[in-house]
């Protein structure tokens, strides 16, 4: 069954969202298609009024909380994601296709139908207490942002950090949100022991572009302020210029790195735009809706860095791309890092402090 909806009404409902469609995921037998029936010119708001699209939060009874990976081009082998889906609505988010696994759309569903894991802290304490567990840095924010808006109320990320602090377990966080400053007390305490660092993702310094690409994430200015506040709290802070999108934000690389360095960032990294699975269509739709004059040029440059395809999933190449344009971006990044004296004294987080915290009923240690 196909539901016909005036396009104007539909787009009004999606104000404040990143995706401009909600096509079914790749595993679904039936597809939903937005149809332009040619009657938009005569459309009246009173004819088809839709309420604003509200965010739905679904509690997930997770069975485990630490996710493992063996990817050779990723610097960590385990991660925690307190949430599925992300309300920030970043149109380019490589995590969007994961919503297809649960029968939902990687489009609007990904940013409006969210899953929370309220038992995350309890699961983590259990997994860290397992006999033979060997600590290595746990990454947070690798799939969806642990400090997206719903965290302010649910506080699942904070509860996870409390467990990691009690076990003296190292953690690295990636976020776009100033909400991370709420947990500066825990992160500062852990950082003093060499157990924590935070990476702030900054895609652009242009507030208008950021609001279009990342409609519910913190503004660029607030992210710069977040780097400054984290650094002043003694928390090693990294800036991620990601994703790099040719002919859209790549000209801002040096400006973003410089602003982050001035705010106190001690290290930096970048990742080229990735368009796996449904993302290639979602991103192309977004370009045509928001950057129609440059859409073809952007996609042409992307293919030049992906061997003529929209995406190349090969290890290492998926992060950096190939070809002259990708090499130019890499060269510019390394020159900027050298000039700004970033990435000079990178030290690994400590794992030798890991210890199970005492539990009620444990025998006191003898002196």
Image (spheres, grey):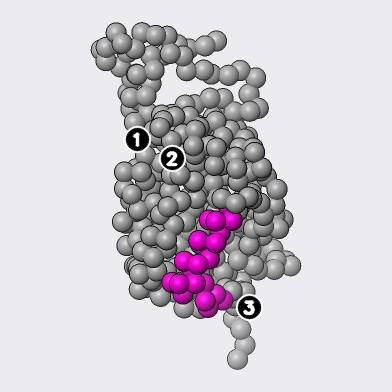
Is residue 167 visible in the rendered image? The answer is: no
Report the residue at 57% width, 73% height from top.
349
Foreground of the two, 211 or 169: 211
Query: Residues in magenta?
Result: 326-347
Badge 3 or badge 1: first in the primary sequence: 1
Dot 2 and dot 1 residues touching (CB under 8 Å):
yes
Residue 316 image-quadrant placement: bottom right
In this orientation, which residue lies closer to the viewer: 308 or 115?
A: 308
Pointer 1: what residue? 16
Above-or-below relation of 187 to 53: below
Which residue is painted at 36% across and 43% down in the image? 209
Alpha carbons under labels 3 and 1: distance apart: 45 Å
Above/below status of 237 relative to 147: below
Q: Which residue is mark 3?
A: 352
Residue 270 at least partly seen: yes
Please determine whether, in this image, residue 231 is positioned above or below residue 251.
below
Q: Earlier in the sequence, mark 2 or mark 1?
A: 1
Residue drawn at point x = 36 percent, y = 8 percent: 39
């Amino acid at each position: 069954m196909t539901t016909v909806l005036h396009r104007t009404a539909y787009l009004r409902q999606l104000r404040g969202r990143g995706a401009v469609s909600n096509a079914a995921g790749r595993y679904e037998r039936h597809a939903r298609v937005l149809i332009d029936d040619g009657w938009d010119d005569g459309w009246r708001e009173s004819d088809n009024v839709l309420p604003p699209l509200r965010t739905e939060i679904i509690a997930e009874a997770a069975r485990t909380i630490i996710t493992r990976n063996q990817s050779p081009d990723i610097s960590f082998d385990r991660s925690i994601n307190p949430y599925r889906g992300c309300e920030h609505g970043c149109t380019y988010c490589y995590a969007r296709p994961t919503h297809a696994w649960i029968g939902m759309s990687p489009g609007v569903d990904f940013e409006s139908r969210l899953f929370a894991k309220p038992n995350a802290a309890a699961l983590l304490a259990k997994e860290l207490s397992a006999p033979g567990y060997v600590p290595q840095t746990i990454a947070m924010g690798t799939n969806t942002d642990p400090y997206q808006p719903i965290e302010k109320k649910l506080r699942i990320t904070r509860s996870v950090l409390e467990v990691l602090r009690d076990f003296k377990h190292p953690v690295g966080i990636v976020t776009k949100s100033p909400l991370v400053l709420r947990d500066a007390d825990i992160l500062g305490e852990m950082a003093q022991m060499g157990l924590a660092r935070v990476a702030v993702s900054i895609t652009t310094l242009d507030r208008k572009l950021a609001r279009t690409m990342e409609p519910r994430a913190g503004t660029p200015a607030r992210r710069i302020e977040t780097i400054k506040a984290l650094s002043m709290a003694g928390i090693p802070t990294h800036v991620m210029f990601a994703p790099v999108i040719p002919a859209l934000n790549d000209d801002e690389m040096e400006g973003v790195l410089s602003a982050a360095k001035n705010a106190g960032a001690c290290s930096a990294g970048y990742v080229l735009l990735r368009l796996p699975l449904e993302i290639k269509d979602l991103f192309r739709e977004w370009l045509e809706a928001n950057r129609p004059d440059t859409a073809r040029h952007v996609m042409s440059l992307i293919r030049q860095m992906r061997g003529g395809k929209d995406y190349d999933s090969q290890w290492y190449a998926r992060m950096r791309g190939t070809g002259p344009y990708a090499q130019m971006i890499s060269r510019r990044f390394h020159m900027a890092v050298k000039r700004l004296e970033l990435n000079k004294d990178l030290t690994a987080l400590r794992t030798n402090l890991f210890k199970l915290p005492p539990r009620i009923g444990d025998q006191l240690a003898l002196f």
